[in-house]
Image: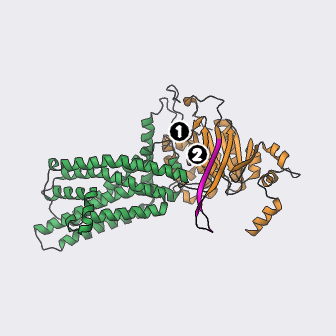
Amino acid sequence: MATVPDMLGPLNISADTPALRIRGVEKHFREKDPETGRWRPVAAVAGLDLEVPRGEILGILGPNGSGKSTLIRLVATLLLADRGRVEVFGLDVERNRLLVRRLINRVSVEASFFKKLTAAENLAYATGLYGVPNRVAQARAREILERLGLPAKKLSVPLEQLSRGQQQKVAIARALLTSPTLMLLDEPTTGLDPKSRREVQEFVLEVRATHDATIVISTHDMDEADRICDRVAIINAGRFAAIDRSDRLKARWGGSAGTMEQVFFTLIGEHLDEADAEEGGD
Amino acid sequence: MQASESRPDPLSGRRRPLSALERELRAVWALVRRNFHLIRRYLGWEIVFLFYNVVNTLTIGLIGLALPAGAARNREVVYLAIGALLWNFLSILFQEVSNSVQWERWEGTIEYSFMAPIHRLTYLLGVCVWAVLYGLVRTMVVLVGVALFFHVSIARADLAGAGLVLLASSVPFIGLGLIAAILPLLSTERGAQATQVIQGVLLLISGVYYPVSVLPGWISWASVLSPATYTLEYVRSTILNGASVRGVLPISGLLLLWGVVLIPVGLALFMWAERHALRVGALKRNG
C-alpha cells in the first residue's frame, strides 16, 4: 500500500473528536401524491442521532427507501438537512463545506463516470479536482486496482467497456486516491459477483488498517455487515431502529436463528415468511 | 482550523504544501483536460459538427454572392460571413458554459464534481477557459474554410480592433452562459430546453445576418439587451469600414463592464441554484 497521507494532521483536530457526529438530523423531500396529485412532504430521514469514533467501520442496513443514501448524501455535503447538525471531525458540514470535502469521499451504488473516457482519464479528472498530480494519481491507481484484482492495463479502457464490478473497483480507487479520512460507501458491493464482493470487503478492511480511515458503509448484504463492520445500524423509515455490535444485535434480536437476517426483519417489523412472499410476488 | 505550514501536502506529497491558488489552478486544468479528453473520444462527432459549421457558414456567405458582381457583393459576403463566424464563436461559448452542468447530470458525475473541495468559481472558471479555447479553435477552422472558399477583399479591415471587440464581448457571453447554466441545475430536461430557447432568442434579436433595424417594432427594442448586437455591429465596422482600435475602445470597455456585472450575477445565481438543489435533492436522489 502506498504511503498514507495524513489529512487530519494539518487541521489540528484532536484525537478524541469523533469522525462523524449527527444530532437530530431531519430531511424531507416533496413527492406528488399519486391519488390526489398534490405535493406532500415525505420524511427521508426523521431525527437521526449517531456518533462514529475514528477508525470504526459502521454498517448501515435498511430496506430500500429507508434513508441510507440520504444519510450518506447529507454527510457528503450533497444535501442540506432541514433540521439538526452533521459534523465531520468536529467540522459542521454546512459551515465548513470545503474543509469537510477535503476529508471525505464517497462511493455510490452506481459507478458514476464519463463512460467514453478511460479509467485513467476519469481518475485524472477526479483527482485533479483535489489537486493530486496526475502522475501520482496514476501510480497509486495502478497499486489500488491491482490490489482489487483489476489489471493495470484496464486503466486505458473506456469505462463503458468495463463490467459493473470493474467500474465499481475504479470508483473505489477514485475515492481512495484523494486519501479521505472518512469514506462513505453507499452499497459498494451491490451487483458484484461473490469474488469481487469479497475482494472489495477485504480491501475495505485493509484501508481501515493502513489508512487510519473511518468507514461508513451502507449495504443490503447481511453477511457483509456482520463480517466487516465494528457496529451495525439498522435504519427503517428514516430512523435508526438499533445501533450496536452485530453479536449483540444477534443476541438481542436474532431469535432462535441468531442471524443478522433475523435481526433485520425483526427490527423493520417484517417476518421472514412475509418477506419471502413479497419477493415471490415481485 | 489552521493548516500547519511545516507539513508536506498530504495529497501531492510535495515538501512545500500546495497553496490554495495552486490547488484551484490544478482543478481548472483538470476540467480543461477532461473536456479535451471528451472531445478526443467523440472525435467523429466533432468532425461532423465542424464540417456542418464550415458548410453552414459557406452557404450563408453564398447568399451574398447572389448579388451582382462589385463592391456591394463583396461587402455583403463579408457581412454575412462575419455574422456566421461570430455567432459560431459566441454560441460555442454560451453552449459550453450552459451545457457543462447538463452534461454532468446526464453522465451522473455531477455529485462527484460538486463534492470536490474547490470553490464553485474555480469549477466555472475551468468550464469558461475551456469554452474560450474550444470556441477559438473551432472558429479558426471555419475561418480558414471561409478564406479559402471566398476570395473577397478585406483590405480595409482593422483586425486588431475586431479582435479587441471579440475579446471584450466574450466576457458578457460567459456571464450569460453562467446564468443559463443554472437552468439545468434546477431541472435537467426543462433546463436544457430553456437554454436552447435563450440561444434562439439571442440569434433572432442580435442582428447576426441582418441589421437589427429590420426587426419588427415589437421586438426590435430587445436587440439592445444582447451583447452580441454590439459585438456584431462593431466587428463589422472594423472589418468593413476599417474602424480603428481607438474607435472601438469605448464599446469594448462597455462590453467588458457588462461582463464584469454579469459574471458575479451569474455566479451568485449559480450558487443560489446549487443551494436550492442541495435543499430539494435535485442533484440526484435515490434511497
Residue type at numbered disc 1: Arg
Q: Colour of chain B?
A: green
> How many numbered markers are drawn?
2
Left or right of residue B57: residue A235? right
Q: Residue furthest right?
A: A256
Camera-nearest residue between A32 and B16: A32
Closest to the observer, B213 or A105: B213
Give the answer, above or below, for where B259 lies relative to B212.
above
Residue occupied by mark 2: A76
Secondary structure mostly seen in magenta is strand
- Point out residue B116 in the picture as x, y percentages from the top left corner: 51, 44
Image quadrant where one finds the C terminus of chain A: bottom right
**Disc 1 element:** loop
Outermost residue on the top side: it is B6
> How packed is label 2: few (under 14 Cα within 10 Å), some, or many (20 or more)?
many
Amino acid at dot 2: Ala
Chain A colour in the picture: orange
User: Any mark on residue A188, and which?
Assistant: none
Mark linked to residue A95: 1
* Viewer-closest of B49 and A233: A233
User: Does residue A256 appear to the left or right of B154 in the view shown?
Assistant: right
Tell whether position A27 is magenta. Answer: yes
- Where does the image place residue A119, in percent across and percent down from the top left? 54, 52
Q: Give the residues in magenta.
A: A23-40
| Colour pattern | by chain
- Residue appearing at x 65%, y 43% in the figure: A24
Which chain is home to disc 1? A
Q: Residue at x 42, y 44 (%)?
A: B122
